[in-house]
Amino acid sequence: MSDSQFHSVAAVTRTMARPRLLWRALESIAGQTCKDVVWVIVNDGPREPVDAVAAGARERGLAVVVIHNDERHGPEAASNIGIKATRSKYVVIHDDDDSWDERFLDETTDYLESNPDFSGVATQTRRVGEEQRGGDIVEYEIARHNTHVETADIGGVARPGLFPPIAFLYKRSVFDVIGYYDEVVIGGGDWDFHMRFVEKFTIGVLRKPLAFWHCRQNLQGGDYGNSRYDEYGADLWKRYEVAVSNGLIRRDMEAGRFGMGLVSGLARLHAQQNNILAGLEYGLARLYRGES
């Protein structure tokens, strides 16, 4: 299914067998003060729960496109399928477990309209800790994630995790230059896309925490697990992070140039050193407080 109508924003949601989270994503998108948006749901799981959410969205006045895949394709392919099924000026990935402040679309589209030299904009983000209690997903904390970020230069974007997909809105026209999401890089495809993006285009930063990245650390695997925290997903992400970085380094070596490969390698090394220092600081703080 596709939508021939032109919208300002296409919000692509990648989902598989998580209807409770998909209902929450509906509230996030339907609650936006910007109404010129089409919601594209790309489903790798059972059809009926997704169709029920889509019906609820249409009752709220949302333009909705639902695409059911006959087999699981993964998040990168789902992004591409959803993007190609719509017509819009801007694109954003709204995964089924994340959410926005109600002003996210209004403020990000206004930013790009007011700054035509920028092809994308990332907002600052808050991290929402949540867990499954019985049949419910319950939030227990909201913390700063990247509220220190003020710029998105090449070196910053080359470091994994500068901003999550939920925080990044960009012009559809960039696909003509850098292509779509790499469907081979399962797990690290968003970061790979962001790096290819910043190689050619400028990303602005809206210094407001308008995006919420939801994390469920107590769920190991299962439909409601979080890919960055459950054992399998975290291992997969790390392997593809290395594969993406090594691929860029090899490309630079073959071309005999200084490029994104070296930048990403140095950025990853810097991130590892920061993690080590943070662990040491935490351990020293516990010793100072007399904790074992």
Image: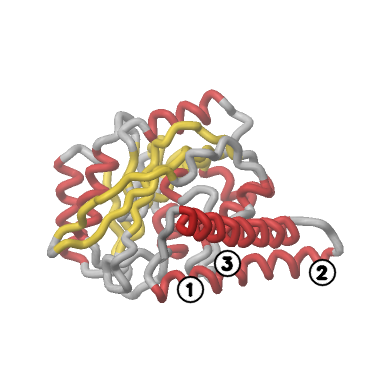
Residue 266 x, y percent position in the rendering: 71, 58
Residue 66 can be seen, yes or no: yes
Compute the Cα span from label 3 to label 2: 20 Å
Q: Nearer the viewer, mark 1 or mark 2?
A: 1
In screen coordinates, is 262 left or right of 11? right
Compute the Cα span from label 3 to label 1: 8 Å
Callout 2: helix, strand or loop? helix
The amino acid sitting under disc 3 is Glu
Q: Residue furthest right?
A: 256
* Residue that mark 3 sits on: 241
Residue 160 can be seen, yes or no: no
Kindly identify the residue that appears in the image at 24 percent across and 51 percent down. 139
Callout 3: helix, strand or loop? helix
Position of residue 67 relative to residue 114, above or below, is below
Q: Which mark is residue 236?
A: 1
In screen coordinates, is 175 left or right of 39? right
* Quadrant of the rendering where the N terminus is positioned: bottom left
The amino acid sitting under disc 2 is Glu
Q: Nearer the viewer, residue 224 or 126?
A: 126
* Residue that mark 2 sits on: 254
